[in-house]
Image (cartoon, helix red, strand yellow):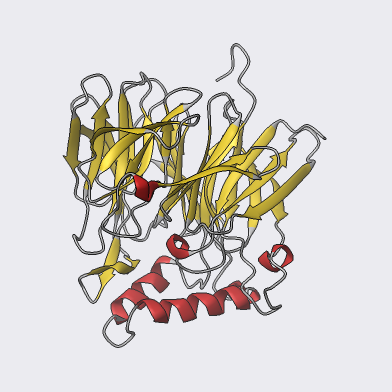
Amino acid sequence: MREYPYAFHVALDGNGLNGLEGRAGVCLFRYDPATGDHSYKATYFTGASGGHAPSVDPSRRIGFLGNTGQHLLFYDLATLEEVDRVSTLRFEVPDTTIKGSTHVVWLDDTQFVTAIGEHLWTFDVNRLTKAEVLAPHGLKVPHAMKQTASGRYIVYGGMDHPVRGEAREVGILDTLSGEVRTVTLPTTCWHVVCHPVLDVFYAISFRVHPADRTDYAHWGMAWLRQYAFEIDAEHGQVLRHWVADRDVPAHINSDVTISDTELIFCTGGSHTVVLVDLETMTRHRIIDEHPGSLETWAYPRQSLTTVGESLMRANLATNANLFAESFRVSRGSLIDGIYASQLSADQTLLFTANRGQNHISVYDYPSLELRDRIVMPELGEIDGSLSEWSDPRLGFHHSYLVSPEPQAGEH
């Protein structure tokens, strides 16, 4: 088999508007920047749902597909074949179906931490039916999880709860003392990333409006200003923050990554990658993959799905504001944007996966010049039972990049 230096694992949630209820799969995109050669494979796992965030163990032996369907699901890194699965309902039953083990933090080659129900749990891949409770996580719906540079703190974002309402909080677990700290913020923040060398992390605002003013199970994108908070993990204190007025296309973020100089996050609502200067937290640059309002009609099947499923989420008569603000956030587009973005270990390449346009792009970093763009196959080519009129999106979501370790003297 041909060897490629880079392996870009992207979770797949299928072709619906609400990925939390969709399919569960993985796309593996292999790439050689020296020649531009690439290969890809996509697979979906039956009996599972809500594919959300892939992760690879430190020894690079096994992949984990985080999902909202209450499964721990593992796959072979080369073939994408399923190697193990266990129901998390045997450990704890959540109070809402969106509360799943969407993200994990690997402690070593076999042990990892994830959220189940109201607690953080630790597992060993060799004994998946045996688990230990670490601590109550303290959030309404814990989401993205990362480990700080020293390894001492596990930090995690939180989602709004369908019944308990707006989150506006992130969590910090001190792995030495076992103490959990909840940090209250002005906005809900689903996603976080850690500083490369300090026990500091960044939480990015995820701002929505609930349907009928109260229903957070059926929300719409809010045309409000966006934030990035710099938080000291030891003390649970906000050190600095970046704020962008609502006209900056930085809405509904997904993957968050970081370089030595910039905080980097992609947006499913605004079709961009936003790069915030870490030295000042006042300047930013943008990669814009917006297709254009008129060009959206080049994607009629995707657009019709968006319109149809939006009407299923909320009553148009009583939620006109949700539809109007979502249309403003997307700048007139009826398809979604970039959900995956990862920086290579040597900080020379930035990989993105665009859910709405169903393509993967590779940018040179830090110049942000487009190096390659590959249009991926339609979902109907993988699932032969779909009609030719079906929405063709594979459903790109969060991602994980396996890249060569930097040589001495590199980043």
Q: Compared to 54, does 197 lie above or below?
A: above
* Occupied quadrant, residue 295: bottom right
Specify whether residue 377 is in view. yes
Front residue of 47/137: it is 47
The residue that appears at 64% across and 69% down in the rendered structure is 392
The residue that appears at 45% across and 66% down in the rendered structure is 18
Q: Residue 21 at x, y = what percent? A: 45, 64
The residue that appears at 31% across and 82% down in the rendered structure is 320
Front residue of 406/129: it is 129
The number of numbered badges drawn on the structure is: 0
Q: Residue 9 at x, y = what percent? A: 60, 43
Specify whether residue 192 is in view. no
- Relative side of 198 to 31, left or right: left
- Relative side of 352 to 39, left or right: left
- Relative side of 362 to 122, left or right: right
* Occupied quadrant, residue 330: bottom left
Q: Residue furthest bottom?
A: 317
